[in-house]
Amino acid sequence: MKRLTLVTMVAGALFGAMGPLGLVGCGDSGGIDAKQIAKIEVSEGQRVVAALSTVTVSPDLPARLRVANTGTGALQIRDIVVTSTPPGAFTVTSLPIPSAEVPIEIYPDSLSHTFSVEYNPAAVASGTRASAIVAIRTNITINSGSEFVFNVAPESVSPKLVLSPPVLDFATVSANASVTKTVNVLNTGAADLVISRFVLGGSPGYAATIGGQTYNVDANSAAGIVLSAPITIASGNAEKVDVTYTAAGPDAAQGSLVFFSNDTGAPNGSEVKLYANLKGPCVKVNPSRVDFGAKLVGQVAEIQVELQSCGDVDLVVSDVALVDDGGGLFGLDKGRVGALPLTIAAGDSIFVPVTYLPTQVAQLEAGGGFATDNG
């Protein structure tokens, strides 16, 4: 019987939640031979492309996508199809061109196949934005069935505000004591980032030093302060902001610092959460043990596993992974979990889809029981 463990990376640290999550499955009620199942992996450079995620393409630099097989059986690429809106804006080039009659075969841990997606802005009417969907059609895989799909969009030159860390936890602060922590405001985009306004709210013990001036939590800061001299951060650079908490007593204190900028991807601002004298985050997995039971060979079974934020502050999940995928029999679709890192509010939950695909009927032992591999 195959077993594996699901773990979560919570706020940058690895935790087993309520003990390891054991997943159990048996092919038509027994042990499994996992030698004939493929697992598709699509990447762009060093970045793994998740199913349903977006790849950006510039007019002068096509996106080069690599298709690899990390499973245990042969992967057959039978077609690569692009659906472009408008037609002709995006095209795919693959050498050779796969087909159902003559597929491109990729064996585990061997050579991969590379294809490119090109963008032609001349095919796009003024004032409109092109988009496309690319489908890689294959034989059955453990993680994407028979079709791996991702989105394509034109690359835009714009700023991108990233806060590191997104949570400042001051831990325990004694009465009348002060603790200062730093948040880095990074611009990971391709254009200048301009911060024009911020909001500082929450417990009155918090203060932030922005642009050389210190602001305390009060009615004005909670309503929002417009910077007389906006802060400009060049592409690839960062600005440090110090946040100080001064405790009046042992009571729990929460706050929030929100930056407003010309990052079009953050119209509601970019937030740093502030915590002091709190118990902290907690993660609970439900169920703690998943049994897929008897399943038909060749049919994918799926169970939704709940990750609950059981603490008194938000839970930040930086990654969800299978420690052991049972030789490729168990799968996890991160694309359906959401963009990581993912913040789960205290008391809320997300659901992680875990799949199982048996590939062979179990053999009976002499006594009539089903044989297992004790894996």
Image: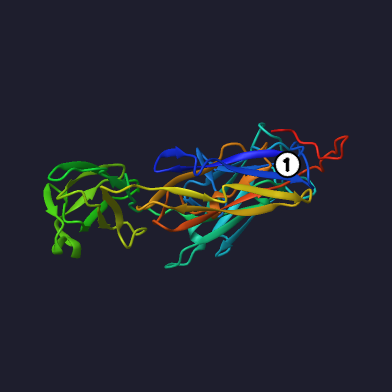
Where residue 103 sits: x, y (%)? 75, 45
Identify the image quadrant of residue 179.
top left
Q: Is residue 147 toward the left or the right of residue 17 in the image? A: right
| Quadrant position of the C terminus in the picture | top right
Relative depth, front residue between 262 and 165: 165
Is 103 placed above or below 350 here? above
Residue type of the residue flagged with mark 1: Ile
Q: Residue at x 16, y 52 (%)?
A: 205
Relative depth, front residue between 30 and 143: 30
Q: Is residue 138 visible?
A: no
Is 175 placed above or below 52 here? above
Identify the image quadrant of residue 216.
bottom left
Where residue 346 sits: x, y (%)? 39, 56
Where residue 314 sits: x, y (%)? 37, 53
Q: Is residue 249 toward the left or the right of residue 139 in the image? A: left
| Quadrant position of the N terminus in the picture | top right
Residue where numbered disc 1 is placed: 37
Q: Is residue 362 visible?
A: yes
